[in-house]
Amino acid sequence: MEMHTYFTLTSCSTLANFLELPRDLSYLNLTGTTIEVLRSSIELLDGLCNIKLKNCKRLVSFWMVIWKLKRLQRLDLTGCSEFKNFPEILEPMEHMGSLSLKGTTVKELPLSIGNLIGLQVLELSGCENLEYVPSSIYSLNWLECLMFDGCLELQKFPPFSGSLLSLKELSLSYCSILEIPDFLLSLTTLQELDLSGTMIERIRRTIKQSSELSILN
């Protein structure tokens, strides 16, 4: 039976730095701390599966060596309001299943987002500065949940070049998108679509091709 080692410093509001962590960590929780940068030494924690940096209000970046953590499954940056630049993903990440950038100030996702080949959940809710999504997002064939609610600057999607074979839930509520591309409305796997609070005036007939759609808001 595989053992998991947890290291939690939740709400240590004066913690701004750390020099070394236990090498056998599988779960790292720094929620509510004041760290500004996740340092390069984290690459030594090769068993790390889950990193939670929720509400780290001063976090501005992390080193790209984080992508050397091949067992990483979840990365949570929810509420990191100073986090602006999401780094390039240098190599394919097979096990990364969930990425949350909710409430960050990122303006764009890197083209290399397509390297998160195992991603199932991508949460961008409340990313009010997000303007650009690369077409490589369409190559995420395991993606089931895609949340853009509250992305006030997001006005359009890139030209379609992919498949999104597994997408079940899509939220565009309170975005600035004026029109839904046909390819999104014709996804046969789509079960839930949220368009509340948008300026969309009409829904195309292609929505009939979404044979699994059960919730339309």
Image: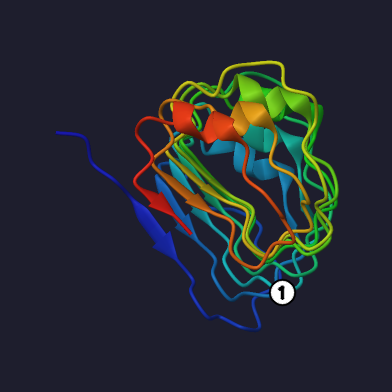
Residue underneath mark 1: 57
Visible residue check, residue 179: yes
Residue 115 on image: x %, y %: 65, 22
Query: 58 or 76: which is nearer to us?
Result: 76
Say if 93 sits above or below 2 in the image. above
Residue 24 position in % (x across, y down): 40, 42
**In which quarter of the view is residue 3 placed?**
top left
Q: Position of residue 195 (x, y in %)?
A: 59, 57
Q: Is residue 116 above or below residue 16?
A: above
Can you give x and y, in whole percent of width and height, for residue 119 in the image?
A: 51, 32
- Identify the residue at image location x=39%, y=44%: 26
- At horizontal 33% and vertical 50% (from top left) the residue drawn is 5
Which of 176 and 32 lies nearest the eye of the viewer? 176
The total of numbered circles placed on residues is 1
The crowd level at tag 1 (other Cα within 10 Å; few <14, some 14-19, many 20+) is: many
111 and 8: which is toward the camera: 111
Seen at 74% across and 61% down, the residue is 199
Secondary element at tag 1: loop
- 55 up-or-down from 70: above or below: below
| Side of 187 where 61 appears, left or right | right
Along the viewing direction, whichever of 177 and 202 lies nearer the viewer: 202
Query: Which quadrant, please, contains the N terminus?
Result: top left
14 versus 41 height, above or below: below
64 displayed left or right of 213: right
**Mark 1 is on which residue type?**
Lys
Q: Residue at x 71, y 16 (%)?
A: 161
